[in-house]
Image: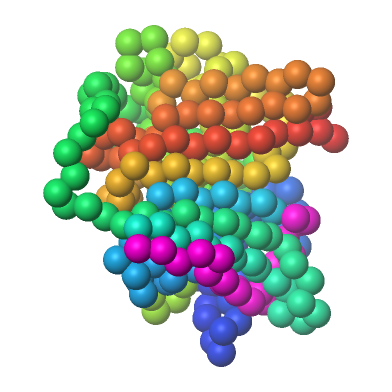
Amino acid sequence: MSESLYYLHDGVFSPTVRTGSPWSTTTQHGGPINALLMYGMETVALKTPKRVTRLSVDILRPVPREPLRLKTRVLREGRRLAVVDAGLERETDGMPVAVARAQLLQEREDHELLFPRTKTPVALVAAADRVNLMSDARRHEGPPGFHLDVEMRHGMDNTNPIGWLTWAGKLISGLPTSPAQRCAAVCDLATIVSGRMCLSGEGKWNNEIRFEMLNTDTTIHLMRPPIGLWFAFHAPSIIDERGAGITAAALYDQNGYLGEVVQTVASNAT
């Protein structure tokens, strides 16, 4: 398989087989879509002294494994704050397939903490156990795609589970992949990873567990710029009632607490 998720030519992003999902040979996984929309937001941020502090993504329909166009629009540009919209459209007919909104804030080197966060040590990547995100059956019998490139480590912090994830390759051929783009891709997996960690039992990881929940969005809050290749969901919660649910987890990188990831889920989705 190609090492990149997309090729970029004349403003068109052509997906490779690595963007595929485990559910269909014709659709893209949500992880690459999150990363591509983060790329669009970071491209806008490069023109300002600001960085992405929140990214909210809504996938409007199953994203076909077809060429896409990315469009961005600055809704507000202030001295300290900017709000940006982005959308992905099918290149053939302009059909929208995903939209996102980001908040950009100005970095302040002279900032004095008003409410410092208590540092919570967590199991580092090197101390966590190597596990497979996907079961052997799904890995060998299902379609190829993004899910097969994800590496995972599972550990415990006292009684709280932690799952470290990364993925191989680049987002766009010929361009560097930022830590924020890599983090955004991983965050699409919050619901499946959180659900399995909660259902596997304390200290265990069972990748054969399946449950009828489908995430409909992803919102990522970043306290600071992400670093490195690995990102973790710590002490996740997942609840549902009357067909609607919420997944939430603290987000970590190798320097510690990074932010939060939240997903809305359709419960008992069939």
- Could you tell me which residue is drawn at 45 percent across and 66 percent down? 77
How far across and down, in percent of the image, does residue 46 sit? 35, 71
Q: Does residue 43 show up? A: yes
Instruction: Give the mark count.
Output: 0
Q: Is residue 90 above or below residue 83?
A: below
- Could you tell me which residue is drawn at 51 percent across and 64 percent down? 76
- Could you tell me which residue is drawn at 35 percent across and 27 percent down? 129
| Residue at the outermost front position | 79
Q: Does residue 181 show up? A: no
Front residue of 129 and 121: 121
Q: Is residue 157 magenta?
A: no
Front residue of 79 and 51: 79
Front residue of 178 and 72: 72
The quadrant of the picture occupied by the C terminus is top right
Q: Which residues are magenta?
A: 60-79
- Could you tell me which residue is drawn at 70 percent across and 67 percent down? 65
Q: Is residue 152 above or below residue 32?
A: above
How far across and down, in percent of the image, does residue 54 sit? 46, 48
Q: Is residue 69 magenta?
A: yes
| Residue at the outermost right position | 270
How far across and down, in percent of the image, does residue 1 sit? 53, 67
In the displayed structure image, the side of residue 180 where residue 135 appears, left or right = right
In the displayed structure image, the side of residue 118 where residue 51 appears, left or right = right
In the displayed structure image, the side of residue 188 where residue 113 appears, left or right = left
Front residue of 190 and 84: 84
How far across and down, in percent of the image, does residue 91 sit? 71, 79
Q: Is residue 95 above or below residue 106?
A: below
| Residue at the outermost left position | 110
